[in-house]
Image: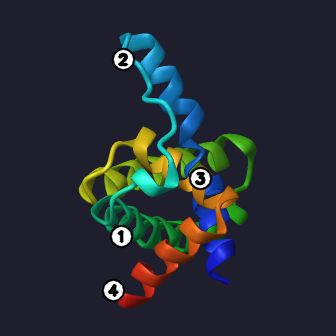
Amino acid sequence: MKKNTIALCIAALSLSATAGMVNANTGVAVPPQQQTSSIKDAKLLQFSIAMDSIDKISTRYESEFQSAEDTEQAQTIQQRAQAEMVKAVEKAGLTVAEYSEIAQQAQQDPQLRERIMTMSRAE
């Protein structure tokens, strides 16, 4: 279930591409991916907090999104949800790029994913 939560949070956010575009437009370099061992527990805790918030936001908007009458309305709902998700990530103390980077690594690294899940259960 929690593995699916990470996947859902990545999909719901859909921000890695957005973050890349924003960074490209502002001239800010996106940092290279960190090695799992170099991701500090403090960052993973921030990620876990953001992930839980994003999961709640996604759940809250899911029925509204599914009942959208047309693509334009669905897009508006998605944009509102994404804006809330960005705020949740930033409130947790991460940038969107940091969140996306950790999420992508967690998808590929079972040990990292387990560290995050352990922190999430401890909250």
Judge by depth and name the residue closer to the eye, 50 or 12.
Answer: 50
Say which residue label 4 marks.
123
Q: Amino acid at mark 1?
A: Ile
Q: CA distance from mark 4 to mark 1?
A: 8 Å
Q: CA distance from mark 2 to mark 4?
A: 33 Å
How far from the left and from the top, in percent, is residue 47? Answer: 40, 62
Please tell me how crowded label 2 is: few (under 14), some (14-19), or many (20+) other residues with Cα within 10 Å: few
Say which residue label 3 marks.
105
Q: From the viewer's perspective, is 27 left or right of 12?
A: left
Figure check: 20 above or below 93: above
Q: Earlier in the sequence, mark 3 or mark 1?
A: 1
At 41% across and 44% down in the image, what residue appears?
Answer: 98
Please tell me how crowded label 4 is: few (under 14), some (14-19), or many (20+) other residues with Cα within 10 Å: few
Question: Closer to the observer: label 4 or label 3?
Answer: 3
Q: CA distance from mark 3 to mark 1?
A: 17 Å
Q: Are marks 4 and 1 in contact (CB under 8 Å)?
A: yes
Please tell me how crowded label 3 is: few (under 14), some (14-19), or many (20+) other residues with Cα within 10 Å: some
The quadrant where residue 63 appears: bottom right
How far from the left and from the top, in percent, is residue 73? Answer: 63, 47
Q: Earlier in the sequence, mark 4 or mark 1?
A: 1
At 51% across and 45% down in the image, what residue appears?
Answer: 101
The quadrant where residue 41 appears: bottom left
Judge by depth and name the residue closer to the eye, 51 or 40.
Answer: 40
Say which residue label 2 marks.
28
Say which residue label 1 marks.
49
Judge by depth and name the residue closer to the eye, 88 or 122.
Answer: 122
Q: CA distance from mark 3 to mark 2?
A: 21 Å
Please indicate, yes or no, whether residue 81 appears anywhere in the rendered image: yes
At 44% across and 26% down in the image, what residue appears?
Answer: 30
